[in-house]
Image (cartoon, rainbow, N blue to C red):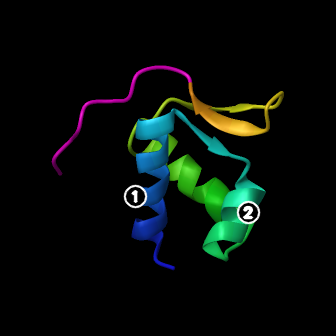
Amino acid sequence: RATIARLGWLASKFRKEGQVEATNKVALEWECSYKTINRDIDALRNFFGFPIVYDANQYKWRLAGPLPEARIL
């Protein structure tokens, strides 16, 4: 599936729920590797400014703060 679709889905999950399950579970759902999902999360964090951290106790990615303002490129 397309990268943009995955990024949109991940961003939506973080906005609605504030967290996303472990990358291996997401990768199974999207039929890609967990490394691809990790790269997508890195893109959300580094390019779009999402404050995403990994919670090792719950095996989930979660927001560590408020979401950034929307930017128009």
Q: Check the image and name the residue furthest to the top.
A: 65
- Does the magenta stretch mainly form a helix, a strand or a loop? loop
Give the quadrant of residue 59.
top right
Q: Residues within 10 Å of mark 1 (few under 14, many from 20)?
A: few
- Secondary element at tag 1: helix
Q: Label 2 belongs to which residue?
A: 34
Q: Which mark is residue 8?
A: 1
Report if residue 68 lies within the magenta region: yes
Q: Residue 26: percent from the left, percent from the top?
A: 67, 59
Residue 37, quarter of the rendered image: bottom right
Tell me which corner region of the image, top left, top right, bottom left or bottom right, holds residue 69.
top left
Question: Which residues fall within the magenta stretch?
Answer: 64-73
Residue beneath the point at 61% across and 71% down: 30
Three-letter code for the amino acid on which mark 2 is drawn: Tyr
Cα separation between marks 2 and 1: 17 Å
Position of residue 3 relative to residue 64, above or below, is below
Q: Residue at 67% of width from left, 77% of height from top?
A: 31
Q: In the image, is residue 65 part of the stretch drawn in magenta?
A: yes
* Kind of element beneath mark 2: helix
Query: Residue 70 at what x, y percent from top left?
Result: 23, 38
Whether residue 26 is situated above or below residue 42 in the rendered picture: below
